[in-house]
Amino acid sequence: MTVPLPYRVVDRAVETHDTATLTLEPVRQALRPFAPGQFAMVYAFGVGDIPLSVCAIDGLRLTHTVRAVGAISGALHALRPGASVAVRGPFGTGWQLAGAAGLDLLVVAGGIGLAPLRPLVCEALAAPGRYGRLNVLIGAREPRELLYAAEVGGWPAALTTVDRPDARWRGEVGVVTTLLDRAAFDPPGTAAFICGPEPMIRATAGELVHRGVDPDRIRVSLERTMHCATGHCGHCQLGPLLLCRDGPVVTWARARPLLMVREL
């Protein structure tokens, strides 16, 4: 859907000091259903729109986690129940979890990268017999930036680490790749899903390939500036890819050679 439809904020949950999760309901017509990994363009009236991944799949509702880092994200973060937004979508490619049936699942998230991976984890947990072992590895800069803390605490397969612990932190310390040694997975029979800062994606995917995971079974979500979300403006170009159309989720086999090219 390229024409924005009106939605209303019906719930706002504070996640961290600068991050909130907004639940939206259609005012009249609803957008087509989203798949985990896809995104919407969410418009703050009078400010502009930005791409936001869906962080939950719940009927006609849309759920987005937004971190206040700029004018548009700050305006969306400040919205309260009853406020109106406009939404376009769904856009982009999804995680394609169905193709991983019978395989061990390795989900690796850095920072707010957990948001688009959350519905994938929920789908896997809802169908335990369909997949092998599930591991969810989560990294954040510091404890106060961990998302969905109460929910993640109930995931039996979740391991968490932070770069900068505070006085109360009793968990792991270090980058998220340090958790790989504690994860239970068979590399040749594993499908991996990675989202987070690009250096973290490079390091994690590279380490998984080194351990024997097939690059075609590693799916990563890449981020570039998106304006139109329809493949016309070219702002999200990465080599031959337009990430709003051909991504944001692509295999590591496809992404790796493109990310190795120095950008001028």
Image (cartoon, rainbow, N blue to C red):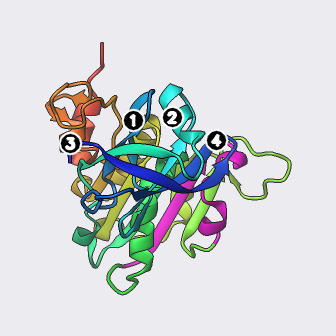
Disc 3 marks which residue?
Answer: 2
Query: N-terminal of the two: label 1 or label 3?
Result: 3
Disc 2 marks which residue?
Answer: 73
Query: N-terminal of the two: label 3 or label 2?
Result: 3
Which residue occupies the foreground of this view, 3 or 252? 3
Question: Mark 1 to mark 2: distance in Å?
Answer: 7 Å
Q: Position of residue 235 (x, y in %)?
A: 26, 24
Disc 4 marks which residue?
Answer: 141
The quarter in which the C terminus is drawn is top left
Disc 1 marks which residue?
Answer: 50
What secondary structure is marked by label 3?
loop
What secondary structure is marked by label 2?
helix
**Marks 4,1: beta carbons within 8 A:** no
Q: Type of residue at label 3?
A: Thr
Q: Residues within 10 Å of mark 2 (few under 14, many from 20)?
A: many
Q: Type of residue at label 2?
A: Ser
Question: Mark 1 to mark 3: distance in Å?
Answer: 14 Å
Give, as a single range, the part of the protein colored magenta.
Answer: 132-153
Which residue occupies the foreground of this view, 52 or 212? 52
Q: Type of residue at label 4?
A: Arg
**Is residue 138 shown in magenta?**
yes
Which residue occupies the foreground of this view, 183 or 96? 96
Query: N-terminal of the two: label 2 or label 4?
Result: 2
Q: Position of residue 32 (x, y in %)?
A: 24, 60
Front label number (4 vs 1): 1
Q: Residue at x 55, y 45 (%)?
A: 111
Query: N-terminal of the two: label 4 or label 1?
Result: 1
Question: Mark 2 to mark 4: distance in Å?
Answer: 20 Å
Query: N-terminal of the two: label 3 or label 4?
Result: 3
Front label number (1 vs 3): 3
Front label number (2 vs 4): 2
Q: Position of residue 229 (x, y in %)?
A: 24, 37
